[in-house]
Amino acid sequence: MKESERRLVQSRILDVVRGVRWRWRARLALRGFVWMALLTGGVLLVSATVLEQLRFEPGAVVWLRVVTWATLALSFLLLFVRPLLRRVTDAQVALYLEEHEPTLEHSVTAVLDEGSRSASPALTHRTTELALEKARKVEYGRRVDQGGLYRFAGALTAIAVLALSTALLGPDHLRFGLRALLLPTVDAAEVNPYAVGVYPGDVTIARGSDQVVTASLSGFESAGASIFTRGVSESTFQRLSMLPGLEGGFEVMLLSVGEPTEYFVEATGVRSPTFSIDVADLPYVDQIDLTYYYPSYTGLPARIVENGGDVAALPGTVVELTVEPTMVAPGGRLLLDGEEEAELTAQADGTFTARFTVGDESFYSIELARQDNGELVPASPEYRIDVLNDLEPSISFSSPGRDMPASAIEEVYLEMSADDDYGIGDIRLVYSINGGDEDTVTVFQARGEPISEVSAGHTLFLEEWPLEIGDLVSYYAIARDNRGASTSSRREVVSEMYFLSVRPFERAFRMAEEQGGGGGGGGGGGGMEEQPLSDLQRQVISATHNLIRQEDSYTDEELSENIVSVGLAQARLQDQVGTLLQRMENRGLTRTDAGFKAVAEVLPLASEAMTRARADLDDEELREALPDEQEALRYLQQAEETYERYIQIQEQQQGGGGGGGSQAAEDLADLFELELDKLKNQYETVQRGQQQQADNEVDELLEELKELARRQEQMAERQRRAAAQGQSGGQGGDAQRDLASETEEAARQLQRLAREMGNRELEETARDLQQAAEAMRQSAASSGSQASAQANSAQRRLDQARRELERARSDRAQRDVDDAISTVEDLQREQRDIQQAVRDMPEAPGRGQPSSPERQDAVDRLQERKNEMYEQVEDLERKLADAATSAQTDNRDAARELSATVREIQESRIKDKIRYSRGTIEEWDTNSAITLELDIESDLQSIRDRLEAARQGVRSAEPDPLEEALDETRDLVRGAEAMNRRLNEPGPGQQGEGQQGQQGEGQQGQQGEGQQGQPGEGQQGQQGEGQQGQQGEGQQGQQGEGQQGQAGQQGQGGQQGQGGNADRLGGGGGTDGRAGDRYNGSPFGGATRGDGREFTPEEIRQYRAEFGQREAQARDLAEVLAEAGRSTDEVDDVIEAFDRLQDEEVYADPEALAAIHEDMIDRLKRLEFSLRRDVEGEVELRGSLTGADEVPEGYRELVEEYYRALARGGSPPGGR
């Protein structure tokens, strides 16, 4: 072999050795990197955790950086550099290779050894070739350290991925710690992610002024923070806890800082830098007095709040500030939201004044000029401006408050009740005959002093209208508030729509009796007793009307969805009318009798009107759809009336039996019931789901109200203690505002529920919650006794709302039981009709004989009715089970009886019997089928008996009769007072003294904490709920709290002249503003002691009718009092007075008329006071009458003497 070839072969062997050496060194390097990464990573994690515990103190950052980088350097030298510096010979590598590859059999070593000594060339060549051959078989040593390389490379990759994940996705403190440790060039103080920002930092303030310090947390959260302060005269820092701020962070007010002070803030171990507050002899606000000039439409006098600050008032209220500085200042300015609003006007006594108008919620502050250089410096903290809501008025019909039938000669009395925080502007009654043009009658028009609560009646004399049987009179009321002189600025609300259905006298009387609560009755020939076709059409009309009156409360999308729902309801009803007509024609009923023909002629007219209404609804033209819907209702009522007359004629012709008249009449009844039951079932299914959802939401709101009431009680107690200690600042204003916001949200939810369910009681409860929220905001903006009184007022209103919701929940059991009994009564009537139909069926044919068409048709109808009965019983069982569960909390007796009723349904197997009877009707003989039907009737009666027992259990939980008597007395007092205002009203231009129509500086004479004037002067010195300038409680004076006529005043804008100079002075400042004119032929005013005109015959007729209604209310009250075991002497005198007021001759002497009426009101108020004392107790009554303990002693004595005189039955002090 040539020498060149031999050298080539030897170089190949050396390449194998070099490859093994490289892989060995790579394994050492990877191993060093892995251990270095593990050791350094562990030190990093521990150091980052330690930094978190030490809150990244600069010293700790420096030392841990040293430890981390030292660990990295040492591990690099020891675990990486040192192993790689080790040198190994080729022989050592060959041995290493042969250790891992034994098949080489020292051939590689032998080749290296022969190269180093003289040997035979042939032997050397052969040995080299043999070694190279063996190396080829072991892949030239590539398998050596291959596993180690893979393991360490994988470990190093995993460590790198873990480190990257931790840096990007790990906890904040780890990421912040790694950044602080691995960036040694960044200053240690700058890498701290946690910081406490402090405002104002270093600052110079006026000596003795207050300073607000706020702290914001960066990079972390904390449940609390503390400020540490140290004055120059103190040796140690004093710790003071900070309060949570409105927009996060914390704040505290340092009071009366009189010397240079150092301070810093610390939260969860993180400390801010130390700042200093320098003090100088700078001007500062020592006291701010606020004078509120309310918008003229409220009728409220100017109100002065001494030593105030925060403002809570209606939009448009002008607030005048009187600023008293700590030292003489050359000038100053008022800032709103940090921007200049007005210059301060200097006064002769050294004070400054400024004015601003309340608009949006904001802040205001004062800056005063320094005496030396005129520089403006902050002189007050930022005071909050809260805007109170002027709630929209409410209007409802207190009588009759429901749809009702009436004869064409009847006199229908309508009573409208409206209230508004700051006065009702007018009330109008709108009615329409048969969906025609609407007529409007103004029943109340405010003139003079605003009236917050008005009850006005109007009698419709139907005999004066050209009405026919089947005609329809729809009516609703509109109320507007008293804001602004222009009509466009007033807000108006619309009541629900109600209907008068003109019926024959006997029919109208019977229906009125049934609707009045007389309970159900049996009777044959029925099937249209509930008139569901017209009822469902009324619901469509009411839904359309409600969408119109609540249009502003919906978004465009919600309104469109609701209109579609109403359109679908109208379409379903129209389809059922069409189906009814088709079936009547298929059965040939329209050709057999004139009565059926008349029904068939009227129903198409109803369908045509529905078509027009649907078209208007599709175009979202609600107001255009309403007349067509009412026209459809009129035709449906005519069809029903025709049906009723036909049934009566058939019964009279056949002796008046209860079996349902002729076969033709039964066919018509079956058709009506068949179609109407379909609609009824669909409606009840939807209604049941909505009712259940509403019940659940009311339960949730009730729990929320309980929590709000508990928190408000604590707040009121803190305010009371603060007032007792003489603290001037509002306590917990922010917390009180938070409560107000939560209460407003609960009110909005309740308002939505009331709107969706058409529930007047829920609407009133929502209004109470809104007024409670207003009282909370006033409490937050007030101080001392004012804050305490408003907090107590808010608490009482929350408690009242909670009691009303609890009462509504407890009333569910009564509602559920009544509904169940009504369902069972319907089932019993249906079962009796089925029994009669089974008896009247044609005889069954013999075995194997086909049934006659008449019998098969009758069987099909009965089986369909059986299917509906089965579904009704199944639904009844489900509803009773739900009702039992719901009543478990409030009425265990009723829940037990309801559960027993469910077991009765299950154990009697009445559902199985009804389902089984479907076959017996067809297959059994008549007598056998009747036996099973009687068994079903017996089971229904057993269920009815169980439900009656449950009803007794519900009634056992009814409220005390005294509470019922108190409620009725309150209603009677309000109605009588409203009537008294109308009787005592002056004519136009004859406003009495003491009225408050204008606002101005001349009204600043009423000083004190919301007390407007003194007793006996015809002014408005309402106490308790009426304080604070009538703010926060809906401005209803004593209304809603039962306080009547304290210190000789009524507190509702209508003093009754019991307090001195207000007597007989053209209304005494106590009118409800009703003028003496007539509007649209309707009287709403009358002769008064200050108005010389006489009553017209129409006025006398209206007043006599209204007094007749009041007398009926008084008689009902007498019955309740007698039931409660109380004397009825006072009420008997009232009844006698009402009877005298119905005498036409008394209206010839207005003085005598007013005397009778006022004496009657006095008696009612004495009775109300006595009942309240018995029901609520002396302590609560006194709290309600005063509203707060801080009442001037002289005034307290007058109030107590006044009520002692009332209790004795005498006249109050001061004469009358």
Image (spheres, rainbow, N blue to C red):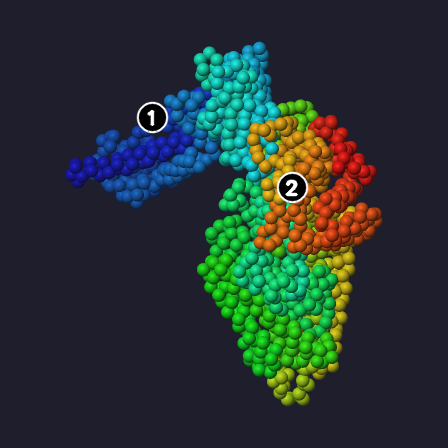
Which one is nearer the viewer's eye here, 810 or 361?
361
- Secondary structure at badge 2 equals loop
Image coords of residue 49 (percent x, y)? 50, 28
- Per the image, the residue denoted by label 2 is 1071
| Contact flag, marks 2 and 1 (Cβ < 8 Å) | no
Answer with the quarter of the image where residue 569 lies: bottom right
Q: Is residue 599 above or below residue 842?
A: above
Image coords of residue 1202 (percent x, y)? 76, 34
Quick check: can you spot residue 1193? yes
Residue at image point 72% right, 29% down: 1195
Quarter of the image with the C terminus in it: top right
- Looking at the rendered image, the disc whose residue lies closer to the viewer, 2 or 1, is 2
Residue at image point 34% right, 41% down: 143
Question: What is the total number of numbered labels drawn onto the structure image?
Answer: 2
Amino acid at the residue labelled 2: Thr
Query: Left or right of 1206: which side holds 831?
Result: left
Instruction: Please tell me how crowded label 1 is: few (under 14), some (14-19), or many (20+) other residues with Cα within 10 Å.
Output: few
**Disc nearer the start of the sequence (2/1):** 1
Residue at image point 71% right, 73% down: 524
Which one is nearer the viewer's eye here, 395 or 724?
395
- Per the image, the residue denoted by label 1 is 85
Which one is nearer the viewer's eye here, 996 or 831?
996
Amino acid at the residue labelled 1: Leu
Which one is nearer the viewer's eye here, 701 or 324?
324
Quick check: can you spot residue 263? no
Image coords of residue 328 (percent x, y)? 52, 14
Residue at image point 67% right, 23% down: 726
Image coords of residue 636 (percent x, y)? 58, 69
Query: What's the distance in space between the residues labelled 2 and 1, CA to CA?
Result: 111 Å
- Secondary structure at badge 1 equals helix
Instruction: Please tell me how crowded label 2 is: few (under 14), some (14-19), or many (20+) other residues with Cα within 10 Å.
Output: many
